[in-house]
């Protein structure tokens, strides 16, 4: 009996020691236990360096033609676009060759192609940049064709090509692919738990995603975070705070470090502007342009897991980033999205909001049913806006602060319309609800 009791006591000691060791590893290295999660929506990484550049600069929409209709698809548990991008990293993609350009009729035929899967970026990127993001040596050295759509035929085994398409000039390119299989991608497509019937139409201001039927989307709630001005100034000035000169006017605080750097923080709107007059080197390549923008974004925010590149204007050296949920952009009460970065010979500027999504919280709101895009166009026409006036239409999430909790924000789906270079929700253009 004494021997049995000794064994039991020994086993208990081993179990306690094992538990302590495992707890230590979990507390000190949580990343390995989170690796399989969908960081786009359901989790926020504590270490900002874990969010790679090819996630922040990645497709935000996946469109699948099932042979009958086109569908916008998404998977809340496994971000399809990022998973497909990972599959493509093993492909051998040759340099693209031009197929067609400035032919709207041909372009519409291509983007409406049956059995085609499309990865859609919100802005154009160069094929050489895509090569760096995919770590593909052949594409890294490409001429630099620009595109915002990648098309893959999942049914025709004879078509051993991947296609690139550019909405701005209707250019289509194709590149031969080796060491590729459609099977892993097809498997991801059929796992989608969001499936919305759409049609891609070319209009005066470009390609529009038309939701042919009313659509239902969930609402979300998130805990948001912000920083004190001192935290931003420490990160951005990279200097002793004793050298800062501070002034305030009606809730607008200005921090100057000599004549070289300035931070303006508007406590009324929670918008900030940082100007660095020493940063006068303008990126010479598009990849350097995007890479420097990505680095600045990481310096501004603790978490960039929900952030995506939304617009890249190479001519004006202007970048805009927005936060995304379930593949849809979040529109805040600003005209520049979440972060706007501009490079020039006179210095760089960064505009950003002191509001960042951190942790999703349970929401008891019912799903929102939105009108079809055709009904949205009819509503705009009733108040005097013709289809030619409309520069863009997007389904996105509206940022609404909770009245009883300033640390929680509600995200509600609605239509956003761009007219005269201004984004507004549908109800502000028409005084009508976008809901069915």
Image (spheres, rainbow, N blue to C red):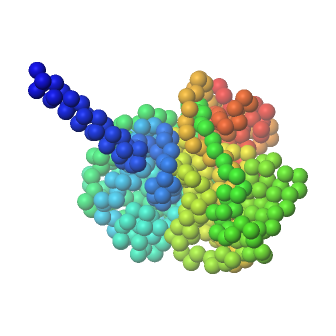
- State whether residue 265 is above or below residue 70: below
| Horizontal relation, residue 137 to residue 199: left or right | left
Q: Answer yes or no: is residue 431 visible.
A: yes
Extreme right residue here? 250
Answer with the quarter of the image where residue 346 lies. Answer: bottom right
Give residue 220's quadrant in the image: top right
Q: Nearer the viewer, residue 249 or 94?
A: 249
Q: Residue at x 21, y 29 (%)?
A: 9
Name the side, left or right, on which 23 lies relative to 47.
left
Vertical order, 280 against 87 (above or below): below
Extreme residue in the top direction: 1
From the image, which quarter does the N terminus lie in?
top left
Which corner quadrant holds the C terminus?
top right
Task: Tell me which residue sits at (69%, 69%) in the image.
Answer: 240
Which of these two is toward me, 19 or 67? 19
Q: Which percent across, then down, holds residue 308?
A: 55, 53
- Residue 188 point in image, percent of width and height: 35, 42
Q: Which percent across, then down, holds residue 326?
A: 52, 40
Look at 56% across and 56% down and name the residue there: 309
Total numbered labels placed on residues in the image: 0
Q: At which x and y percent is residue 345? A: 69, 78
Q: Is residue 110 visible?
A: no
Q: Nearer the viewer, residue 378 or 304?
A: 304
* On screen, residue 111 above or below 20: below
Residue in view at x 27 percent, y 62 percent:
178
Q: Which is more toward the observer, 105 or 47?
A: 47
């Amino acid at each position: 009996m004494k021997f049995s009791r000794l064994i039991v006591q020994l086993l208990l000691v081993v179990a306690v020691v094992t538990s302590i060791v495992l707890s230590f590893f979990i507390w000190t290295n949580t990343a390995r236990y989170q690796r399989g999660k969908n960081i786009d929506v359901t989790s926020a990484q504590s270490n900002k360096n874990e969010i790679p550049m090819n996630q922040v600069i990645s497709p935000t929409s996946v469109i699948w033609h099932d042979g009958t209709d086109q569908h916008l698809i998404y998977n809340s548990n496994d971000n399809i676009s990022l998973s497909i991008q990972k599959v493509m990293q093993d492909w051998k993609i040759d340099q693209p060759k031009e197929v067609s350009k400035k032919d709207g009729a041909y372009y519409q035929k291509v983007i409406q192609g049956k059995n085609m899967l499309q990865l859609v970026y919100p802005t154009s990127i160069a094929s050489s940049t895509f090569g760096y993001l995919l770590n593909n040596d052949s594409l890294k050295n490409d001429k630099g064709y620009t595109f915002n759509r990648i098309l893959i035929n999942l049914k025709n085994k004879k078509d051993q090509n991947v296609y690139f398409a550019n909405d701005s000039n209707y250019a289509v390119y194709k590149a031969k692919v080796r060491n590729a299989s459609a099977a892993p991608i097809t498997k991801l497509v059929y796992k989608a738990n969001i499936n919305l019937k759409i049609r891609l139409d070319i209009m005066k201001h470009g390609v529009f995603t038309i939701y042919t039927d009313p659509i239902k989307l969930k609402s979300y709630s998130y805990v948001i975070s912000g920083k004190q001005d001192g935290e931003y100034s420490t990160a951005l000035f990279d200097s002793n705070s004793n050298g800062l000169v501070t002034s305030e006017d009606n809730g607008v605080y200005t921090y100057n470090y000599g004549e070289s750097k300035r931070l303006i923080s508007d406590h009324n709107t929670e918008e900030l502007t940082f100007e660095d007059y020493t940063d006068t080197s303008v990126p010479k390549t598009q990849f350097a342009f995007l890479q420097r923008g990505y680095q600045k974004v990481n310096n501004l925010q603790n978490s960039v897991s929900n952030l995506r590149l939304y617009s890249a204007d190479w001519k004006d050296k202007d970048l805009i980033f927005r936060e995304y949920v379930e593949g849809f952009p979040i529109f805040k009460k600003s005209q520049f999205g979440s972060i706007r970065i501009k490079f020039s010979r006179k210095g760089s500027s960064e505009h950003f909001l002191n509001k960042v999504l951190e942790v999703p919280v349970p929401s008891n709101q019912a799903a929102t049913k939105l009108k079809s895009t055709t009904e949205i166009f009819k509503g705009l026409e009733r108040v005097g806006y013709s289809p030619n006036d409309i520069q863009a239409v997007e389904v996105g999430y509206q940022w609404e602060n909770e009245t009883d909790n300033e640390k929680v924000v509600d995200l509600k789906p609605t239509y956003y319309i761009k007219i005269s270079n201004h984004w507004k929700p549908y109800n502000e253009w028409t005084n009508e609800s976008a809901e069915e």
